[in-house]
Image (cartoon, helix red, strand yellow):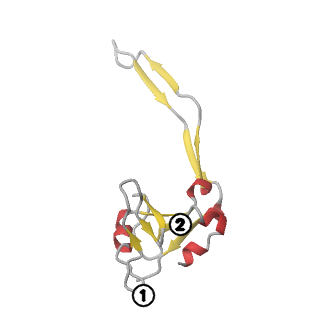
Amino acid sequence: MDLIYTLRAGYRQNGRFLMNRKTQAQIRKFKASTGEYLWSPPTSIDAPATLMNFPILEAEDMPDIAADSFALAFADFNRAYLIVDRVGIRVLRDPYSTKPYVLFYTTKRVGGGIQDFDAIKLLKFGES
Protein backbone atom coordinates (compact mmCIF):
# COMPACT_ATOMS: atom_id res chain seq x y z
CA MET A 1 0.00 0.00 0.00
CA ASP A 2 2.84 2.38 0.85
CA LEU A 3 4.47 1.73 -2.53
CA ILE A 4 1.36 2.94 -4.36
CA TYR A 5 1.06 6.14 -2.35
CA THR A 6 4.72 7.13 -2.66
CA LEU A 7 3.88 8.23 -6.21
CA ARG A 8 2.24 11.62 -6.61
CA ALA A 9 -1.40 11.66 -7.70
CA GLY A 10 -0.59 12.64 -11.31
CA TYR A 11 1.57 9.54 -11.75
CA ARG A 12 -0.58 7.21 -9.65
CA GLN A 13 -3.59 7.50 -12.01
CA ASN A 14 -1.76 5.54 -14.73
CA GLY A 15 0.27 3.36 -12.36
CA ARG A 16 1.09 -0.25 -13.14
CA PHE A 17 2.95 -2.96 -11.28
CA LEU A 18 5.94 -4.63 -12.95
CA MET A 19 7.32 -7.99 -11.80
CA ASN A 20 8.47 -11.34 -13.12
CA ARG A 21 6.31 -14.47 -13.08
CA LYS A 22 7.86 -15.96 -9.91
CA THR A 23 7.16 -12.78 -7.99
CA GLN A 24 3.67 -12.69 -9.44
CA ALA A 25 3.08 -16.28 -8.29
CA GLN A 26 4.02 -15.36 -4.72
CA ILE A 27 2.03 -12.12 -4.68
CA ARG A 28 -1.08 -13.91 -6.02
CA LYS A 29 -1.26 -15.67 -2.64
CA PHE A 30 -1.40 -12.44 -0.58
CA LYS A 31 -4.68 -11.83 1.24
CA ALA A 32 -6.20 -8.82 2.95
CA SER A 33 -7.25 -8.98 6.61
CA THR A 34 -10.78 -9.76 5.40
CA GLY A 35 -9.56 -12.93 3.67
CA GLU A 36 -9.96 -11.78 0.07
CA TYR A 37 -7.04 -11.91 -2.34
CA LEU A 38 -5.27 -8.65 -3.30
CA TRP A 39 -4.68 -10.04 -6.81
CA SER A 40 -7.70 -10.02 -9.13
CA PRO A 41 -7.96 -12.18 -12.24
CA PRO A 42 -8.62 -10.49 -15.60
CA THR A 43 -12.27 -9.69 -16.23
CA SER A 44 -11.98 -10.36 -19.98
CA ILE A 45 -9.51 -11.78 -22.47
CA ASP A 46 -7.95 -8.39 -23.27
CA ALA A 47 -7.93 -7.08 -19.69
CA PRO A 48 -4.83 -7.44 -17.50
CA ALA A 49 -4.78 -8.99 -14.05
CA THR A 50 -4.78 -6.39 -11.29
CA LEU A 51 -3.20 -5.96 -7.88
CA MET A 52 -5.17 -3.58 -5.67
CA ASN A 53 -7.00 -2.42 -8.84
CA PHE A 54 -3.80 -1.51 -10.72
CA PRO A 55 -2.76 -3.52 -13.82
CA ILE A 56 0.14 -5.97 -13.62
CA LEU A 57 2.85 -6.14 -16.29
CA GLU A 58 5.14 -9.15 -16.51
CA ALA A 59 8.84 -8.73 -17.31
CA GLU A 60 11.23 -11.65 -17.00
CA ASP A 61 14.18 -9.26 -16.57
CA MET A 62 12.94 -8.24 -13.12
CA PRO A 63 14.71 -10.04 -10.25
CA ASP A 64 13.10 -12.68 -8.05
CA ILE A 65 12.08 -11.88 -4.49
CA ALA A 66 15.22 -12.16 -2.35
CA ALA A 67 16.99 -10.21 0.36
CA ASP A 68 17.87 -6.68 -0.82
CA SER A 69 16.26 -7.17 -4.25
CA PHE A 70 14.05 -4.68 -6.08
CA ALA A 71 11.63 -7.30 -7.40
CA LEU A 72 8.54 -5.08 -7.67
CA ALA A 73 8.10 -1.75 -9.45
CA PHE A 74 5.11 0.56 -9.49
CA ALA A 75 5.15 3.35 -12.05
CA ASP A 76 3.52 5.36 -14.77
CA PHE A 77 5.82 3.83 -17.37
CA ASN A 78 4.67 6.15 -20.16
CA ARG A 79 6.08 9.11 -18.25
CA ALA A 80 8.92 7.32 -16.46
CA TYR A 81 10.71 5.63 -19.36
CA LEU A 82 11.71 7.00 -22.75
CA ILE A 83 12.40 4.75 -25.73
CA VAL A 84 14.52 6.34 -28.43
CA ASP A 85 14.12 4.92 -31.92
CA ARG A 86 16.47 6.56 -34.39
CA VAL A 87 15.03 6.98 -37.88
CA GLY A 88 16.56 4.85 -40.60
CA ILE A 89 18.41 1.59 -41.02
CA ARG A 90 22.08 1.39 -41.97
CA VAL A 91 22.98 -1.23 -44.60
CA LEU A 92 26.53 -2.44 -45.23
CA ARG A 93 27.19 -4.47 -48.38
CA ASP A 94 29.93 -7.10 -48.12
CA PRO A 95 30.77 -8.66 -51.51
CA TYR A 96 34.13 -10.13 -50.32
CA SER A 97 33.40 -12.53 -47.42
CA THR A 98 31.50 -15.36 -49.09
CA LYS A 99 32.16 -15.52 -52.79
CA PRO A 100 30.04 -15.79 -55.02
CA TYR A 101 27.39 -14.47 -52.58
CA VAL A 102 26.96 -10.94 -51.30
CA LEU A 103 26.22 -10.41 -47.60
CA PHE A 104 24.21 -7.50 -46.27
CA TYR A 105 24.56 -6.31 -42.67
CA THR A 106 21.78 -4.12 -41.34
CA THR A 107 21.85 -2.10 -38.13
CA LYS A 108 19.28 0.04 -36.42
CA ARG A 109 19.97 2.28 -33.43
CA VAL A 110 17.53 2.14 -30.53
CA GLY A 111 17.87 2.86 -26.85
CA GLY A 112 16.06 3.96 -23.77
CA GLY A 113 16.33 5.12 -20.22
CA ILE A 114 14.59 6.64 -17.25
CA GLN A 115 13.15 10.02 -18.17
CA ASP A 116 11.35 10.94 -14.94
CA PHE A 117 12.55 9.35 -11.69
CA ASP A 118 9.50 10.72 -9.84
CA ALA A 119 7.20 8.50 -11.93
CA ILE A 120 8.72 5.17 -10.82
CA LYS A 121 9.11 3.55 -7.42
CA LEU A 122 10.73 0.23 -6.55
CA LEU A 123 9.98 -2.01 -3.58
CA LYS A 124 13.08 -3.34 -1.84
CA PHE A 125 12.57 -6.67 -0.13
CA GLY A 126 14.32 -7.20 3.21
CA GLU A 127 15.84 -10.32 4.69
CA SER A 128 13.39 -13.14 5.25
**Residue 94's x, y, as percent?**
44, 19
Residue at 47%, 80% (x, y): give it: 126
Residue at mark 1:
33
User: Against 83, is 67 above or below?
Assistant: below
Q: Indicate the quadrant where residue 7 lies.
A: bottom right
Mark 1 to mark 2 CA distance (whole Å) = 22 Å
Q: Indicate the quadrant where residue 86 lies.
A: top right
Mark 1, secondary structure of its residue: loop
- Going from N to C along the chain, the mark reached first, 1 or 2, is 1
Label placed on residue 53: none
Amino acid type assigned to the residue bearing label 1 in the image = Ser
**Residue 120's x, y, as percent?**
59, 64
Badge 1: residue crowd in 10 Å (few <14, some 14–19, many ≥20): few
Relative side of 104 to 115, left or right: left
Of the pair 33 and 63, the residue shown nearer to us = 33
Relative side of 78 to 55, left or right: right
Mark 2, secondary structure of its residue: strand
Label placed on residue 74: 2
Amino acid type assigned to the residue bearing label 2 in the image = Phe
Relative side of 106 to 100, left or right: right
Q: Nearer the viewer, mark 1 or mark 2?
A: 1
Badge 2: residue crowd in 10 Å (few <14, some 14–19, many ≥20): many
Q: Indicate the quadrant where residue 60 lies.
A: bottom left
**Residue 102's x, y, as percent?**
39, 16
Residue at 63%, 63% (x, y): give it: 11
User: Against 78, is 104 above or below?
Assistant: above
Of all residues, the one furthest to the bottom in this rendering is 33
Residue at 34%, 69% (x, y): give it: 25
**Residue 55's x, y, as percent?**
47, 63
